[in-house]
Image (spheres, rainbow, N blue to C red):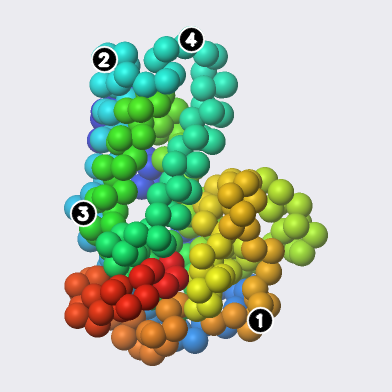
């Protein structure tokens, strides 16, 4: 199969849909928390954002990243093009290094006011379930795509390794936002290697010290390494409040409101007064 075939993008999208449907079914059967606002309007808005992102950017992301990897191979760019490694070893290194790169990107969205203006759309969701994983502003997705392409050019990984990473990363993004919980013993064991929903849910707390923690998506070790790991929420999983403190109402349920949130005058004033709050 041609690595630049649009079929690869469709495969990635189909894999995302499969993971989404499976986790949504588990949520419906055994939800971890009771949703405050129900599903209908929230899901329309969150999936509406996903549809816009997909139409504008998401379908192109795997192709553009793979194309960047191919260009790097032709030009001899990047770290991996300087060594002859077995594919399995290169794949493991690519999964880890790209996950680290996106961990650092996520950390930056909480520290750089301009990036936070876009990222707050994700965190304004007053509930937490699989559709929260789809709730990103199109401009944030576009900037993320450019960043990923730059990282791929610097690393020079195999195109297939990039494709595998993208599929695994998107599936992990859906998983960590799911409104479910692993059994306590399994959750503790799993956190030694990967991010779990209970771990990431803390990141969506209204408390700034909690939202500025647990930035990881795939591997939990980055938060431990950089000192941003938080084991539990102050109020516990059942007591923590999801979303942004200033938007604890029904406004974030609206699609148009979510699209224009980064450009609101109030947001500009908040940036100047306090900088990034939560994320």
Residue 144 at what x, y percent from top left?
31, 48
- For residue 114, above or below residue 143: below
The residue at which mark 3 appears reads as 55
The residue at which mark 4 appears reads as 84
Give me the disc on residue 235.
1
Residue 259 at what x, y percent from top left?
23, 71
Q: Mark 1 or mark 2, which is nearer the start of the sequence?
A: 2
Label 3 and label 2: CA atoms lie apart by 31 Å
Quarter of the image with the C terminus is: bottom left
Identify which residue is drawn at 56% across, 29% down.
Answer: 92
Identify which residue is drawn at 80% across, 60% down.
Answer: 185
Q: Nearer the viewer, residue 244 or 62?
A: 244
- For residue 10, above or below residue 229: above
Identify which residue is drawn at 40% across, 15% down.
Answer: 81
Label 1 and label 4: CA atoms lie apart by 50 Å
Q: Are marks 2 and 1 in contact (CB under 8 Å)?
A: no
Q: Mark 4 or mark 1, which is nearer the start of the sequence?
A: 4
């Amino acid at each position: 199969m041609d690595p630049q075939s649009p079929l690869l993008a469709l495969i990635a999208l189909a894999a995302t849909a499969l993971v989404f449907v499976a986790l949504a079914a588990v949520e419906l059967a055994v939800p971890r928390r009771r949703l405050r606002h129900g599903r209908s309007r929230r899901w329309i808005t969150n999936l509406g954002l996903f549809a816009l992102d997909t139409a504008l950017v998401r379908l192109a992301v795997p192709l553009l990243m793979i194309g960047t990897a191919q260009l790097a191979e032709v030009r001899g760019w990047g770290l991996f093009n300087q060594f002859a490694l077995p594919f399995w070893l290169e794949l493991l290194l690519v999964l880890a290094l790209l996950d680290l790169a996106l961990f650092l990107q996520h950390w930056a969205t909480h520290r750089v006011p301009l990036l936070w203006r876009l990222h707050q759309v994700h965190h304004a969701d007053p509930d937490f379930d699989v559709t929260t994983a789809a709730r990103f502003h199109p401009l944030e997705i576009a900037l993320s795509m450019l960043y990923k392409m730059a990282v791929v050019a610097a690393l020079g990984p195999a195109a297939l390794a990039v494709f595998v990473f993208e599929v695994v990363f998107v599936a992990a993004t859906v998983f960590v936002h799911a409104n479910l919980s692993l059994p306590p013993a399994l959750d503790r064991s799993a956190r030694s290697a990967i991010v779990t929903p209970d771990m990431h849910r803390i990141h969506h707390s209204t408390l700034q010290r909690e939202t500025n923690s647990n930035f990881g998506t795939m591997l939990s070790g980055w938060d431990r390494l950089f000192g941003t790991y938080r084991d539990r929420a102050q109020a516990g999983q059942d007591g923590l409040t999801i979303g942004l403190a200033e938007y604890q109402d029904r406004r974030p349920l609206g699609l148009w409101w979510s699209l224009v949130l980064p450009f609101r005058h109030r947001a500009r004033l908040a940036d100047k007064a306090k900088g990034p709050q939560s994320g």
